[in-house]
Amino acid sequence: MSTLGIVVTAIVAALAVASVLGVTINRRSGALRATEPVSDQDTPYLGLSQIGPTVVHFSAVWCGPCASVRRVVDQVCAELPDVSHVEIDIDANPAAAKHLSVLSLPTTFVFDAEGKRRYRSVGVPTVAELRKALQSLGTIRP
């Protein structure tokens, strides 16, 4: 095989690997992942609800995907009146982001009624995923 053929084959192989990696990474983006129930004693500044679950998402004015998260969370919270929603601007409250190890935007957390972190998502969660996570807490009827 000629040098040109080897170069073309190498480029095609690299593009195939990059495509597979891109699809894999995008498929996981926004997925809500269950976390070990962690009680955060020093999170009163988050404004968590005392009577039901709270969805907390970190955003910034410069974050394009954050508007999509806001729409998803607003839609789910409108359907589930026992669920509260808190949006935290990472630029205005970097201490909260640091405390919860927020390294990229958008990042969304679901806290249960006792204030324990139960789910975390980096990226834009779907309405179905967020609803399912809230229903799994047992406080929301399917």
Image (spheres, rainbow, N blue to C red):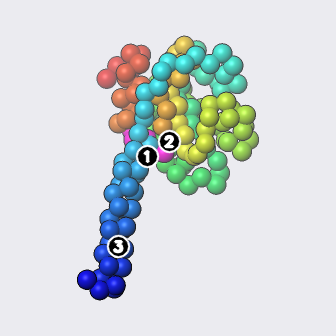
Residue 98 in sight here:
yes
| Element type at mark 2 | strand
| Element type at mark 1 | loop
Residue range (magenta): 123-127
Name which residue lies at 49% across and 32% down.
Answer: 120
- Considering only order in the chain, which callout, 3 or 2, is on the residue closer to the N terminus? 3
* 120 lies above or below 69: above
- Badge 1: residue crowd in 10 Å (few <14, some 14–19, many ≥20): some
Residue on which disc 3 sits: 10
Q: Percent position (x, y) of residue 89?
A: 67, 41
Q: Percent position (x, y) of residue 129?
A: 37, 35
Give, as a three-letter code, the residue at label 1. Ser
Query: Which one is nearer the viewer's eye here, 73 or 108?
Result: 108
Residue on which disc 2 sits: 122
| Element type at mark 3 | helix
Query: Which one is nearer the viewer's eye here, 78 or 34?
Result: 34
54 magenta-colored = no
Q: Which mark is residue 104?
A: none
Give, as a three-letter code, the residue at label 3. Ala
- Considering only order in the chain, which callout, 1 or 3, is on the residue closer to the N terminus? 3
Q: Distance between the residues labelled 3 and 1?
A: 29 Å
Query: Which one is nearer the viewer's eye here, 100 or 3?
Result: 3
Residue on which disc 1 sits: 29
Res 10 → quadrant: bottom left
CB atoms at circles 2 and 1 under 8 Å apart? Answer: yes
Q: How far apart are marks 2 and 1 (CA)?
A: 6 Å
Horizontal relation, residue 124 to residue 128: left or right = right
126 magenta-colored = yes
